Image (tube, coloured by chain):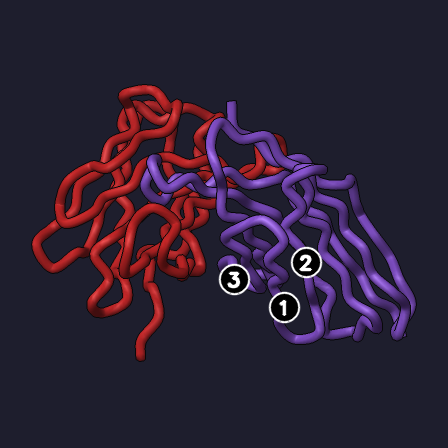
Amino acid sequence: GNSVTQMEGPVTLSEEAFLTINCTYTATGYPSLFWYVQYPGEGLQLLLKATKADDKGSNKGFEATYRKETTSFHLEKGSVQVSDSAVYFCALVLRDTGNQFYFGTGTSLTVIP
Amino acid sequence: KAGVTQTPRYLIKTRGQQVTLSCSPISGHRSVSWYQQTPGQGLQFLFEYFSETQRNKGNFPGRFSGRQFSNSRSEMNVSTLELGDSALYLCASSALSGGLGEQYFGPGTRLTVT
């Protein structure tokens, strides 16, 4: 089947620390991969995406590379800020299943000054 | 450009009742998807509507149903509510299906079943 596995949280980091949130997937076809972010009391916002192997998605200092050989899409940021505190979701979608996204369980990140 | 709107934002219902949630997509978007978010199960796909047709359906009982109108607005209905239906219900709209277009999420409707 199709599924996404994320590292368990919560994650607490000091400001300017390096962030990595691991994400691996299983898919019956060739997926597109996404990272979404959810701030308290809000819906999900697209952070970045990659649609084919070796693509790197990037946005707001975050980046993730689509690794087909390791079925991974790890999220990284070189220097986190307090404003990055949120829940991060890794997700995949297959073109032949419409917009049925498969989400990971989410990783809560808290950045302390 | 107005975002995805969901009404109501909060709802309290009693077991056995039914409920209807509404989602207005971004103007021009023809795809509307619904998700259930709970602490235990995370985000689970309910169904997607594209141009008034149900495109895909997740693994939920028949008590969960939906529809889409000609203006792309969508409603989701849950009948015979159970305590386990308490969740945040999110809808997302997109210009395209198949993950080709960016999905924009609404703020959600928080349903509490007592």
Q: Residue, x 32% and y 41% (percent of image)? A: A98
Dots 1 and 2 on the same chain: yes
Q: Nearer the viewer, mark 1 or mark 3?
A: 1
Q: Nearer the viewer, mark 3 or mark 2?
A: 2
Residue A84 location (% of width, % of height) = 72, 69
Q: Quadrant of residue A20?
A: bottom right
Q: Who's the residue at 21% across and 56% down the image?
A: B30
Mark 1 falls on what kind of element?
A: strand
The answer to whether A11 appears left or right of B114 in the picture is: right
Q: Check disc 1 and report the residue beneath it.
A: A58
Q: CB under 8 Å between callouts 1 and 2?
A: yes
Colour-to-chain, red? B
Please report whichever mark, 3 or 2, sits nearer to the chain's N-terminal start.
3
CA separation in Å, label 3 and label 2:
13 Å
In the foreground, A4 or B93:
A4
Q: Which residue is mark 2?
A: A64
The residue under label 3 is A46
Q: Which amino acid, by three-letter code, is at mark 1?
A: Ser
Asked which quadrant contains residue A103, the reply is top right
Which amino acid lies under the numbered mark 3 shown in the image of this protein?
Leu
Q: Residues within 10 Å of mark 1 (few under 14, many from 20)?
A: some
Q: Chain of mark 3?
A: A
Q: Chain of mark 1?
A: A
The residue sitting at 32% across, 57% down in the picture is: B93
For chain A, give the colour: purple
